[in-house]
Image: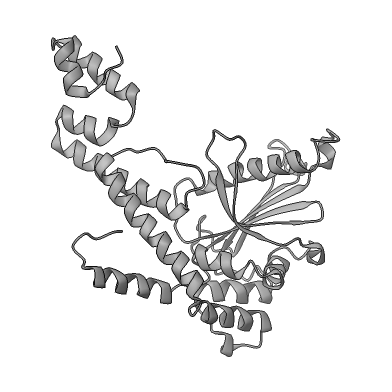
Amino acid sequence: MFEENLTLEQIEQQREQKWQSLTLADDFLFCKIMSDPKLCKEMIHRILPALDVEKLEPAEPQKTLKLALHVRGIRLDIYTKIARSVLDIEVQKRKLSDLVRRPRAYHIVIGMDAMNVNTLKTSGRYGELPETYVVFICTFDLFGKGRHVYTFHNYCEEDKEIELKDGAYTIFLNTEGTMNDVTPELQRFLDFVAGRIKSDELNDSFIKTLDERINEAKDNTKWRREYMLLLNEFDVGFLEGREEGREEGREEGRTEGRTEGRTEGRAEGRAEGRAEGRAEGRAEGRAEGREEEKRSIYERLTASGMSPHEAASFTGWNGF
């Protein structure tokens, strides 16, 4: 979170420390490193060994997909395809309350993208739709059962032996698992993501290469500049959100860092507005920029006896 009392020098030092402390568990570095075809191929092979990774298409890091021009898009960390399978690989450090529902949206978006680009646009055959895999690499145990991997697909509630076989698979990986439920190769990858092992502690060429690439990344001036711009976007978004209380996203395709910054800022703005306990605080903290909310406040004020002119002047609503 942005701290206003810091000097410019302190802010720069803080940002440099963040850059130097980045690991594979940070989505910025994860996307950069895994855009390498060989590394992405090995990672997917360890997570989904049944897939033929030799047919893996080049990964598209931080790809944004949306169903229509006027709706908000979904940014995917690593988006790629293998033959008739479409994959989205996400790295997740924050335990969000809506995390279990996100895969549903991701399956819809990547499925619709496959429909538009490949299949239904020409043949109209649903049977040709690709299988979709949404994988979250989490640095926490989302379900609290100690597993390293939780795989979900659809089946019949009344008879669990009947699988729907709709081709949609959701996988949550957990770096903090305690069970012996994954291959040694995947276990080493998860341990590396969690920062529990170093490449020189084991004989694993994949892990060694990951470690080398991360160290090289810290000297990559282009990537460093991109990251600093993202941090700046986050800070600006936070300040704007705090001032405006509830500002809707300005444009599609903004970085996730700025979106999160606006969200935190808006939350703080709403809290400050509620604490004031006054109608003007609610208008400034929660309704600014939304004409329907201004109108609602206007109607309540006139109903309580305030003149239309005074109410309009107070709320700034001029829709009559």
Residue 283 image point, x, y percent: 23, 29
Q: Is residue 17 left or right of residue 110?
A: left
Q: Point out the image quarter for the C terminus.
A: top left
Q: Nearer the viewer, residue 79 or 132?
A: 79
Residue 66 image point, x, y percent: 60, 41
Residue at x 81%, y 36% (from the top left corner): 126
Q: Is residue 207 left or right of residue 225?
A: right
Residue at x 36%, y 47% (from the top left corner): 262
Name the image quarter holding residue 198.
bottom right
Asked whether the viewer can see residue 175, the reply is no
Residue at x 58%, y 85% (from the top left corner): 199
Reply above or below: 55 against 160: below
Name the image quarter holding residue 54.
bottom right
Residue at x 28%, y 30% (from the top left corner): 287
Q: Is residue 244 left or right of residue 185?
A: left
Q: Nearer the viewer, residue 185 or 269?
A: 269
